[in-house]
Amino acid sequence: MSLLEVDGIETYYGESHILEGVSLSVERGEVVALMGRNGVGKTTTLRSVLQLTPPRSGTVRYDGTDLAGLRTHEVADMGVGWIPEDRRIFSQLTVEENLRVSVPDGSDVADALSVAFETFPILDERRDQPAGTLSGGQQQMLALGRGLVGDNDLLLVDEPSEGLAPQIVADVAEALAATASETTMLLVEQNLPLALDLADRFYVLDNGRVVDDGDADAVSADDERLRRYLSA
């Protein structure tokens, strides 16, 4: 049984039909990349999983449980974390405070912080620094660290390299690889080399539909099979 199973979902914003029969799966322990141009439904797919924008039909199952009718916080409590494109860190709080507020009630805070700091040593070095003063790459590491201390079995990561300078993207790639060693991940990413380097498998969306999928090691960043769906 897959950790996440999305089967034929139809999702709308008002009367706008965004997802048209999208199906995908994520196995426990793997990284799956969801790729495509802007506006084809990648973020909506994540929102559908989280029940932020519930599908009108089709099913989303997490660890065998149908998520239909659940509130987003109930989905999150089941172990599904979300790293949105804008990161949503608390800029006035320190790095450590950002991590602390993400630790679930009843969990050992020291142990949770150790996981984050061992995964991202730079955050340990800057634990007392206001999060808003970190570089873009370091802020992305903090967002990922919050996902790790949240005791999540699945992380939905939305466009982690978006808007970052090329030299910072390399830092983010390392951060994502470190995160992937700790948890299962569904990754939305337009940077094709980065996505293929990290992912075990991929899906390509176009106009709200899955138009291609396969093993990441069976294609390359120069593959016309993918480029035609990703170029502007």
Image (cartoon, grey):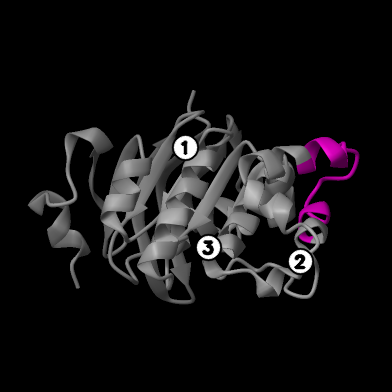
Q: Which residue is mark 1?
A: 5
157 lies left or right of 33: right
In the picture as drawn, the residue positioned furthest to the right comes out as 106
Spot occupied by residue 33 in the image (x, y as percentages of width and height): 37, 47
Q: Is residue 156 above or below residue 12?
A: above
149 lies left or right of 44: right
Name the secondary structure under disc 1: strand
Which of the numbered marks, if any, corresponds to residue 137? 3
Crowd class of label 2 (few under 14; some 14 to 19; many from 20; radius 10 Å): some
Name the secondary structure under disc 2: loop
**Is residue 75 located in the magenta-colored stretch of the structure?**
no
Residue at (19% x, 73% y) in the render: 232
Crowd class of label 1 (few under 14; some 14 to 19; many from 20; radius 10 Å): many
Which image quarter: residue 179?
top right
Point out the frontmost of discs 2 and 1: 2
**Is residue 102 located in the magenta-colored stretch of the structure?**
yes
Spot occupied by residue 153 in the image (x, y as percentages of width and height): 62, 36
Q: Between disc 2 and disc 1, whose residue precedes?
A: 1
Which of the numbered marks, if any, corresponds to residue 129? 2
Q: Which residues are magenta?
A: 98-113
Q: Between disc 3 and disc 2, whose residue precedes?
A: 2
Foreground residue, 52 or 196? Answer: 196
